[in-house]
Amino acid sequence: MYTEKTVQAVYEGGVLRPLDPVPLKDRQEVTVTISDEGDIPRDHPLLASPEEWAGAAGDDISLDKVRRALSTIRGSLSETVIDERREFRAREIDERSLLTARRRLEADLGSRRLFVARSATHTFA
């Protein structure tokens, strides 16, 4: 029987560790697809929790009601998702840039301290 399930996992010590229980037998071989989308915080407003998904599965909503609700949204849903991903990645890039700049500054300050310390040990005539 073929099943497919997306799970969040953490990679540590050379091993992928699922964050939630998975329906697998011990030592069962599986195919793993790796995605960096897992970097999205679990409390991100666009992500639904497993409980929300389970609750929504029992909802009795007609296709017509869904169409009416979607027709009130301006623009395109795909454009909204793409924009949200761009904003998330831009924030991520900004955070990486700040971290890189901080590391460079700390390294530069460290080398200047070393220069000052060495200069203090020498007497100039």
Image (cartoon, grey):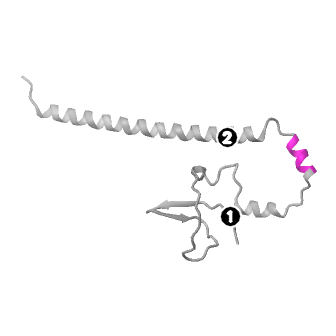
Find residue 4 and name its label: 1
The tag earlier along the polypeptide, 2 or 1, is: 1
Residue farthest to the bottom?
26
Q: Residues within 10 Å of mark 2 (few under 14, many from 20)?
A: few
Residue at 41% over, 38% down: 102
- Magenta span: 64-71
State yes or no: residue 67 in magenta. Answer: yes
State yes or no: residue 13 in magenta. Answer: no
Find residue 67 and name its label: none
Q: Picture coordinates of residue 46 (x, y %)?
A: 70, 49
Residue at 44% over, 40% down: 99
Q: Picture coordinates of residue 110 (x, y %)?
A: 28, 38
Please identify, in this view, whether the residue under mark 2 or under mark 1 is nearer the observer: 1
Q: In the displayed structure, would residue 46 be above or below residue 98?
A: below
Q: Picture coordinates of residue 109 (x, y %)?
A: 31, 35
CA separation in Å, label 2 and label 1: 26 Å
Q: Picture coordinates of residue 103 (x, y %)?
A: 38, 39
Q: In the displayed structure, would residue 125 be above or below residue 58?
A: above
Q: In the displayed structure, would residue 30 be above or below residue 97?
A: below
Residue farthest to the left?
125
Q: Quadrant of residue 123?
A: top left
Secondary structure, magenta segment, majority class: helix
Identify residue type, mark 2.
Glu
Q: Quadrant of residue 116?
A: top left
Q: Which residue is mark 2?
A: 84
- Residue 39 seen: no
